[in-house]
Image (cartoon, rainbow, N blue to C red):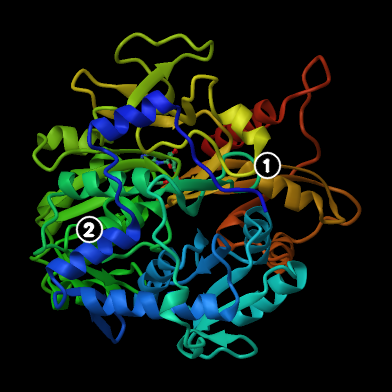
Amino acid sequence: MRPLQQVWPTAFAARYSDKGYWRGETFTSFLRARVAAMPDRLAVIGGEQRWSFAELDARAERLARGLLALGLKLGDRVVVQLPNIAEFLSVVFGLFRARLVPVYALPAHRSVEIVHFARTAEARGYIIADRHDGFDYRALAQEVCGEVPELAHVVVVGEAGPFTALDALPDGDAAALPEDAEPSDVAFLQISGGSTGLSKLIPRTHDDYIYSFRASAEICRLTPDSVYLAALPVAHNFPMSSPGVFGALYAGSRVVLAPSPSPEAAFPLIAREGVTITGLVPPLALLWLQAAPTTPHDLSSLEVLQVGGAKFLAESARRVRPVLGCTLQQVFGMAEGLVNYTRLDDPEETIVTTQGRPISPDDEVLILDDEGRPVPEGEAGNLLTRGPYTIRAYHNNDGANARAFTPDGFYRTGDVVKRMLDGNLVVQGRAGDHINRAGEKISAEEIEDHLLGHPNVFDAAVVSLPDAFLGERSCAFIIAQGETPKAAALKAWMRRRGLADFKVPDQIVFVDGFETTAVGKVSRKELRASLRRRFLAQAEG
Ligand code: OOB
């Protein structure tokens, strides 16, 4: 098995510790500290479950023992694909306790993605819910296990079918539990937004990740009286750690898990549980703004609405305070590390028009032109970053590491930003070819590869088009061969291949050919850009 690591050069690591960013805590040690301080305080609410800190901890410990008794071994990686249910938290804290390593998958992922994560991480376990949102994850697990036989243990929250039920794990021995991890150990693998090709795996350490959510909780002023609603899928970095469920538990706040981020599901929870803060992607924020004026539910407990994952336009941002009566916080972050926030006491104009500034005084931010020179202050350029919670390498991917990191350890984010005089960043767009569909990142290349697998597709180019609701939608330009397939049939074929639904192109346009330049050759990047230009010009004309 490839070892898991995330290493900062010694001088950097020493500085991050000396400055008190890295404090030697682990997931297990911080949860134990909360249990010691406030055992009976309500910590997690999800569905019918209401757990105190002590109960969350007891459940985590029982799961840790059970998972080891099942046959998982220290250091094994376990793909976790759970919806927003209380068990998400008992499972991940249980994995940390057993020194097993979660690999976070989203509920929307299907066999193509899960097989890729399981193989790249060399996973031996897979934890799912029985069903969610009309989808049976046990059928998915059967398919995935057929392709990845190393995935020896499938554990199911609910009805297990042919697998092991979480509630029926063997009664393991407490003495079998290992010593706690080192704070510099990799705690889990997070999934990249995937700018080119398939998603990459992001190893995050206890030290670096805990710093990011502890500092985020401070920026968001969480206290034991705060109530955080996880509305977005909790395995995503934003609701997980910005400040997310972990930041909330760290601060002794209460976490409420919403089964869906829709106003219908979330508004009654806000009213019932007195939610004070939550985070959304822009299209959902628009839905909430639309639904709030006529809702019968009392939303007055909401103090902060965070919006991030994709650009929130100023005209929409401006409506948050008047309509919802709370403070907007823009969040511009990435699973690789760097997270920027507007601060709660920033002037309204800053909150509305910028995507905020970094968490840490030691987040180094460079804004460079395409030749790698710093752009003049206030002008747009490529964002590179390095800091106490930004990774230096992906797991098991030398090619991506060579492309994504500079020799001196800066991560090339692929985002084009400008920095205002007060230090706040404004996101202008992306340098790379990915589609940010309502916060879900789609690699054009990955989708083109799939399309080329269809017998009637000769060539394909996938681009983003502006979309009033999603921000961006995906459009595939296709040159057919033989019989031109129907767009709907092609989409159904992609779903059957086991691709997450959000990756299936929103629009398919058949074309006779792709233009080539005088040299006869055109880069994929230029091709996508010219197809997008021509299409938009036609649509306007
Ligand atoms: C978050 O993380 P990822 O890894 O799914 O995606 C990161 C990318 C960024 O590089 C940027 O292109 C885009 O998503 N993005 C934004 C944005 N927030 C993220 N683009 C414009 N405006 C924003 N506010 O999406 C993520 C991770 C932690 C916290 C928040 C978001």
Looking at the image, which is closer to me, 147 or 90? Answer: 90
Looking at the image, which is closer to me, 411 or 173? Answer: 173
Quarter of the picture containing the N terminus is: bottom right
Question: Disc 1 residue type?
Answer: Glu
Crowding near the residue tagged with mark 1, few <14, some 14–19, many ≥20 C-alpha atoms within 10 Å: many
Residue at x-position 41% and y-position 44%: 184
Residue at far front of view: 175
Residue at far right of view: 482
Residue 296 visible: no
From what the image shows, is residue 418 above or below residue 158?
above
Quarter of the picture containing the C terminus is: top right
Q: Secondary structure at mark 2?
A: helix
Residue at x-position 35% and y-position 45%: 207
> Residue 430: x and y, percent?
48, 32
In 3D space, how far apart are the residues under numbered discs 2 and 1 (Cα atoms)? Answer: 39 Å
Q: Is residue 254 left or right of residue 537?
A: left
Q: Earlier in the sequence, mark 2 or mark 1?
A: 2
* Contact check, label 2 and label 1, Cβ < 8 Å: no
Looking at the image, which is closer to me, 161 or 232? Answer: 161
Residue at x-position 36% and y-position 70%: 89
Which quadrant of the figure shows ligand 1? Answer: top left
Residue at x-position 67% and y-position 70%: 151
Question: Disc 2 residue type?
Answer: Tyr
From what the image shows, is residue 387 above or below residue 38?
above
Q: Secondary structure at mark 1?
A: helix
- Which of label 2 and label 1 is nearer to you? 2
Quarter location, residue 518:
top right
From what the image shows, is residue 457 above or below residue 534?
below
State the residue position of label 2: 250
State the residue position of label 1: 445
> Residue 36: x and y, percent?
17, 68
